[in-house]
Image (cartoon, coloured by chain):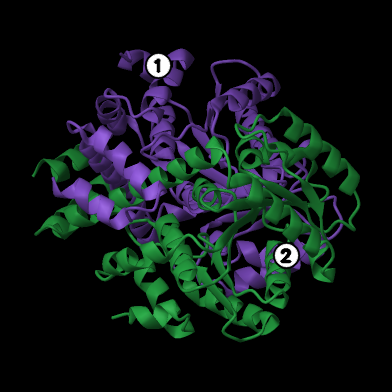
Chain colours: A purple, B green
Amino acid sequence: MIVIEKLFSGDPRTIARAISQVENYSPHAAELMKAVFPRTGKALIIGITGAPGAGKSSLVDKLALHYKDAGKRVGIICVDPSSPFSGGAILGDRIRMATLGLDKNVFIRSMATRGNLGGLSRATVDAVAILDAAGFDIVIVETVGVGQDEVEIVKAADVSVVVLVPGMGDDIQAIKAGIMEIGDVFVINKADREGVLRTQKELDALLSLAHRPDMWQPPIVKTIATESKGIGDLAVAIESYNDFQKQGDAAISRKQAIAKWRLLELLQERLLSELLARNGTGERLDKLVTQIAQRTKDPYSAVEELVSK
Amino acid sequence: MIVIEKLFSGDPRTIARAISQVENYSPHAAELMKAVFPRTGKALIIGITGAPGAGKSSLVDKLALHYKDAGKRVGIICVDPSSPFSGGAILGDRIRMATLGLDKNVFIRSMATRGNLGGLSRATVDAVAILDAAGFDIVIVETVGVGQDEVEIVKAADVSVVVLVPGMGDDIQAIKAGIMEIGDVFVINKADREGVLRTQKELDALLSLAHRPDMWQPPIVKTIATESKGIGDLAVAIESYNDFQKQGDAAISRKQAIAKWRLLELLQERLLSELLARNGTGERLDKLVTQIAQRTKDPYSAVEELVSK
């Protein structure tokens, strides 16, 4: 069991164990999150996404150091759903911990496991809530990849940062609508590379086409994360959107959308786990899976059989 | 209603309407898929993924042309979950249709919509099954992004192709475990760029570390899609893995894994839609969403309330 007082005092081992519980959807997870929820809402939650190769990890590390130097406690959650094993992720965490300094003011954790029930995005927002309740001032959620889960995770942050690099060229369209829409702040990292002006122009053009319901004009920040350049500017841009988003109707409808998404994700997971826990369902499921694999039954008929009992 | 004979005869408008039905999880979708399923299993399904900027669309178009020139009928499904609106996707389809030639032997469709119930991956595999049943010899599924949904979609193909470009450098690790594991064939596109040798070396090193249960050694193909170079080699590599995967226990366990994933995805969607269809649930859901957004209720308690009735 998690000692909730130790969690609220920010004890790293207790935090790590609490996150494992929500990651594994353990029987204690619901109780834990009910206790955690009333203590949340204080941290500034920053979502950072972008294509592989954009240098997100370096940027996140430098941003975390920036906040740490300013006396803040910083939590980092890295979502890497493409990695089915947490071994590599843990190794990566250790390397990054060494850069960031091993103390109580920085916590880093990768989320890579995804069970039968899905639920990586749900587990991620739960982990963010745990860090929030544990007294971290800043929680950075970093996602690798630009899939739907990642978009949802980043959308659930207070401020969403989209990282680009010069020379993405012909595929900047690939990150058009969806990603453009979620970016409250844009970063052109590796800004010492060729093509930075062109990327900025393309980005400006795309942003001028976008119609945000809140009328916010997302700033574009240029950084060279490996040389710690532009990190202060990024923090200022994040702060300015955070101040902006606290007012107005758009903030309320955004919070509603996040709440709805969280509720539906959790509901799906719960309904599936209840069905699978029913006596004999596991065996019947295995049999149906084999029939589908052998094409003697279609998945829709199989679902009807499972649901009808 | 879909006229199933017209679907099986390959009528493009009927195919398009059938895909819309599975995309929207319409009441007819289950009946439709039950009719479609026994007709599937003939097409070669190729999954293509990779980071934005890797030139996947050009590669897919050229590969499709290659097959078309060989007298095959080719279907293309583009999954772009980062785009919440299908308008842009449809425009993109039209542009690509012009390149590919507007005839009955090529069909292209973007899947971008994702409803309340999720289910984009389920809708995608259903769309692939529809094209298979409609008599297409080759179905190419192209995903933008490297999130978990995309990984699952590509895994469900007969042959999975991962596209890289030279100079992804420090973030090649970002595509390590998960993506490396799903690639049956690797492509280094834009192979006229600097750094192609280094990328190949890094890829070789990563592949030599990976342990595939089926002992397959994934080939690495170099292409310049914009100049149609290397496309024939890619088709040969795809064919060689397809021949290989038809034998052996690994093929069976792969088919089992795909069947299980499809079944669970569909089951989740069904359970949620049933619950939401119950009288009064919509209203209660809205109320709970507001309470969660205002932090007067936590999502776990809200789920219990919805499930308990």
Circle 1 Cα neighbour tier, 10 Å, few/some/many (<14 / 14–19 / ≥20): few
Circle 2 Cα neighbour tier, 10 Å, few/some/many (<14 / 14–19 / ≥20): many
The residue sitting at the front extreme is B247
Closer to the camera in the image, B159 or A54: B159
Indicate the chain on which mark 2 is placed: B
Tell me residue A266's x, y (percent): 30, 42
Q: Is residue A239 left or right of residue A280?
A: right
* Quadrant where the image shows the N terminus of chain A: top left
* Residue A169 showing in the rendered view: yes
Q: Amino acid at mark 2?
A: Leu
Q: Amino acid at mark 1?
A: Ser
Q: Is label 1 or label 2 in front?
A: 2
Q: Is residue B8 left or right of residue B166?
A: left
Label 2 element class? helix
Tell me residue B44's x, y (percent): 58, 61
Labelled disc at residue B156: none
| Label 1 and label 2 in one chain | no
Write down the quadrant of residue A231 in the picture: top right
Indicate the chain on which mark 1 is placed: A
Check disc 2 and report the residue beneath it: B59
Check disc 1 and report the residue beneath it: A9
* Quadrant where the image shows the C terminus of chain A: top left
Q: Residue at x 54, y 67 (%)?
A: B77
Tell me residue B105's x, y (percent): 59, 80
Write down the quadrant of residue A232 in the picture: top right
* Residue B295 showing in the rendered view: no
Q: Residue at x 33, y 59 (%)?
A: B116
Residue B259, relative to residue A2: is it above or below?
A: below
